[in-house]
Image (tube, helix red, strand yellow):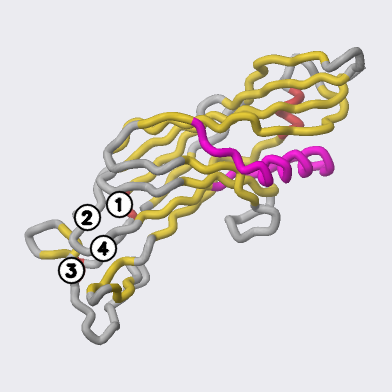
Amino acid sequence: MDARFGSMNAWLLLAFGWMGCSNTVSVDLTSASQTFEISASSVEVPATLVEPGSGRLVRLPCPTGVCPSTTELPLACREGVCDPEPRVISGAVGDVIDFDVLLGEASVVLRVVESLEVTQLSYSVTPNTLTVEIPETEIFWGPEGAAGLDSPGVTRLGTMPFLPPSTEQDGEMAIDAGGSQALSDYVVRNTSRRIRFFARTTVDLAPGDPLPQGGATATVFVTVRASGRIVR
């Protein structure tokens, strides 16, 4: 299954509030829509594992405990039948995000950023013609130089819930408190505030399942609250 991930658009100023009588303010910023697509076409099932005429994954016995695994579809012998291992799908989400640019576009410019909190991760999945379920999709952030999920500093930020086959849905993701705090620490402590986003999900086929078809488009909106001192 391939995953093509859309770009992060410019951040929009929603609100700001004075905190006490000091010159400290908090600014709520929400991203414009950020989309990524999940397509069943990249879950390659070798022809030898397709039941002729049915379009389903064959129920291949494994009396010796050994299955004809391939790079595209590793198999494990479970209960006497070859069962595909869950396929992990991951990729970069959009382009580099520069918080200095985002904060500079706000009508109230913070001279010193003291904290950054992810307050909401919302999503909408439409259309969805996938014939397989997606257990969950995780969203990660990492430094600009991160090449993938295994790179130093890459941290989970939130999780999109279970997505049934061919079902459109929307809602809010669960925010990872540790990932939000790590992002705040990075933005506050580093002179370079450029980061990247990544996503990871899985597809798990079972013997006798129909071959995966279709695709889904997910749109994500991210809201953060930056707090600090204003330019005087």
Q: Are marks 2 and 3 in contact (CB under 8 Å)?
A: no
Q: Are marks 2 and 4 in contact (CB under 8 Å)?
A: yes
Q: Tell me the number on the disc at residue 211.
A: 2
Residue reaching furthest bottom? 64
The residue wearing badge 3 is 59
Q: Secondary structure at mark 3?
A: loop
Amino acid found under the numbered disc labelled 1: Ser
The residue wearing badge 4 is 45
User: Of marks 1 and 2, which one's residue comes earlier in the chain?
Assistant: 1
Q: Are marks 1 and 2 in contact (CB under 8 Å)?
A: no
Q: Secondary structure at mark 4?
A: loop
Amino acid found under the numbered disc labelled 3: Arg
Q: Quadrant of residue 141?
A: top right
Residue 228 falls left or right of residue 153 = right
- CA separation, marks 2 and 4? 8 Å
Q: Tell me the number on the disc at residue 13.
A: none
| Viewer-side label of 3, 1 | 3
Residue reaching furthest front? 79
User: Of marks 2 and 3, which one's residue comes earlier in the chain?
Assistant: 3
Circle 1 residues within 10 Å: few <14, some 14–19, many ≥20: some
- CA separation, marks 3 and 1? 21 Å
- CA separation, marks 1 and 4? 10 Å
Query: Residue at 30% of width from left, 51% of height from top?
Result: 41
